[in-house]
Every structure is written in C-alpha cells, then in structure tokens.
Amino acid sequence: RKEVEQDPGPFNVPEGATVAFNCTYSNSASQSFFWYRQDCRKEPKLLMSVYSSGNEDGRFTAQLNRASQYISLLIRDSKLSDSATYLCVVLLYNTDKLIFGTGTRLQVFP
Amino acid sequence: GAVVSQHPSRVICKSGTSVKIECRSLDFQATTMFWYRQFPKQSLMLMATSNEGSKATYEQGVEKDKFLINHASLTLSTLTVTSAHPEDSSFYICSARDFGQRNSPLHFGNGTRLTVT
C-alpha cells in the first residue's frame, strides 16, 4: 500500500463546478499536511497547508480527518486556470521527510 | 516568503558528461535541502537529503557515486549527475524548508529539465 494515495483522475469538470479530492495516508506518525499544485512541466507550488480544524482560502477548503487518516480539498466555482495536478503531501513527525501522493489531475473546461 | 532558486532550468548534454545543478535558499538558511526527481506522469521521488556540513543521505536505489551532492553552505546545495546517460533524463527539483518556522512547508526550486542525448 502506498504511503499517500490519491485518485489520479482526471477529473473533468465545467467552469463553475465544485470538485473535491481526497487523499489517504497510511502512517499515523504523519504530522503536517499540505496541498500543492503542479502545472505541466513545472515545479510544485504550495496551495495551502491543512490544519486540524480545517481551513479555507478563498474558493479552496482543506480538511483533515486524523481518525480516518485522510485529507480533502474542495474547490468551489472552478476556473479554467484551476486545471492542474493537485498533490497531497504529508510530513512525517520528527523527520524532515515529505511524502508525495501521485497527484490528482483536474481539467476544467468552458 | 521563503524562496528557493534553482539553476539551470534546462540543460541538454551528451551521454558521458557531467551536469551540475545548483539550489539556493534566498531568504532563509537551510541546513537541509532535498533533491527530487520526477519522470513524466509520475510523482516526485525523493532522491537524497542534503545536509550542510555532512554527507548526504540517499534513498534506497539512488547511486551516491552517480548523483554527487555537496551542501557547501547554509544556502547552497549542488547536485552533480556524473557520466549522464539518456535514462537520467528527467526533471530534477530541489527544495528546502525554513526550519526556523514550525511546520514550515517545503518550498521548491523551479526545477531543472535534463535531457541527455
């Protein structure tokens, strides 16, 4: 079983739609969680950290469920520019090792 | 915010030559930097952890004699791909965290696309 698992997609959604991605992690020693966005042939860029109480940044909402060991990302009112691969990233406690999911591809169409 | 700079962004070299990639943290000190590799349509794979003032830690399956890492200062790490071969063609990305900030996320350089002909 992979340490961090994501549905690779692609998720094809129309502009204005709401879309949600889930990510599960297997290591209970996971400490911190992040969502990164990666455009084709570019480096990943931090989208948002994920806090225990859940957090929102504009159209993006991230949630963490430690009991079930998953995190989620909700995108409301999708824009064409949201098309990218979204990476779920887990930082293990007491290490500096970040574990990446394979990413979920989102394609927003007009 | 924290910024990581990587150079060069793209390099094409002939088989058998060596290529050096630089990674700098611009506004914070990074005692540890990370080197990742990403093949097309695959996830980022950690190659090694670069430690300032000591030897790098390599992940299983990564040849330390082929991928030389030098962490010369608190703001600079270099990765040298020695005797490059076409199968080394990939996207190499460095990253660093600002350990002065608790739970600081990882910041990435803009990556180096290596093509070995």
Image (tube, coloured by chain):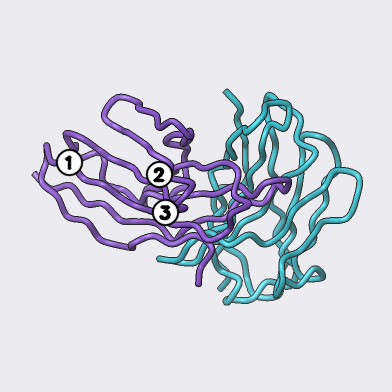
Task: Say what amino acid the circle numbered 3 marks.
Answer: Arg
The mark tally for this picture is: 3
Which color is chain B depicted in? cyan
| Residue A56 in the image, given as x and y percentages of width and height | 35, 27
Q: Residues within 10 Å of mark 1 (few under 14, many from 20)?
A: some
Q: Which residue is mark 3?
A: A41
| Quarter the C terminus of chain B occupies | bottom right
Task: Say what amino acid the circle numbered 2 marks.
Answer: Arg
Q: Nearer the viewer, mark 2 or mark 1?
A: 1
Task: Say what amino acid the circle numbered 1 marks.
Answer: Thr
In-front residue for pair A99/B58: A99
Marks 3 and 2 share the same chain: yes
| Quarter the N terminus of chain B occupies | top right
Outermost residue on the right side: it is B53
Q: Residue at x 73, y 45 (%)?
A: A94
Q: Which residue is mark 2?
A: A37
